[in-house]
Amino acid sequence: MNAPILELRVALTVQDYEKLFTFYNEGLGLDPAALWTNEHGNAVIFEMGRGTLELFDEGHAASVDQLEAGRRVSGQIRFALEVPDLDAALKRVLAKGATLVHEPVVTPWNHYNARLQSPDGLQITLFQVLDKTP
């Protein structure tokens, strides 16, 4: 059976394009896959690996926020991005304008998670999957 969806693409409209371009490019280390500059403005596509969609009810979202941030803070949309080295990624994004919402925690599902806010206010969880062996 063919997959009904071939790609998840999230389109963000931002107020400070250059600042957010730098945040995603240099902070998260994403290379542009496509760039557009014309009389109408600027746009970029960053490929971000495999995409998934998570749906949470309010109770589950509150539980995850409590674990990752100590309180209910995220809105309807939050990015959760897997990184190979959380500490290194966190250092880069903080240097490029992110705000730390909560220090890294180890979750019950054995991920090393940190909650941050992007320069335009988007809640982002960076997570590193820890070794599953004891």
Image (cartoon, helix red, strand yellow):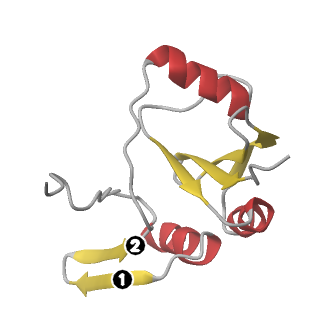
| Identity of the residue furthest to the top in this view | 59
* Mark 2 crowd level (few <14, some 14–19, many ≥20, 10 Å Cα): few
Whichever of callouts 2 and 1 sits on the residue coming sooner in the sequence is 1
**Are the residues flagged by discs 2 and 1 in contact, CB closer than 8 Å?**
yes
The residue that mark 1 highlights is 33
Q: Position of residue 54 (x, y in %)?
A: 41, 38
* Mark 1 crowd level (few <14, some 14–19, many ≥20, 10 Å Cα): few
**Amino acid type, residue under disc 1 in the picture:** Ala
Tag 1 secondary structure:
strand
Residue beneath the point at 27% across and 83% down: 36
Q: Position of residue 9 (x, y in %)?
A: 29, 59
**Amino acid type, residue under disc 2 in the picture:** Glu
In the visual, does 51 lie left or right of 124? left
Residue 49 in view, yes or no: yes
Residue beneath the point at 74% across and 65% down: 85
Which sits in the foreground, 71 or 80? 80
The residue that mark 2 highlights is 47
Q: Position of residue 102 (x, y in %)?
A: 76, 40
In the visual, does 124 lie left or right of 36? right
In the visual, does 25 lie left or right of 10? right
Quarter-of-image position of residue 55: top left
Q: Is residue 66 above or below residue 48?
A: above
In the visual, does 29 lie left or right of 78? right
Residue beneath the point at 73% across and 41% down: 110
Residue 119 in view, yes or no: no
Residue beneath the point at 54% across and 32% down: 74
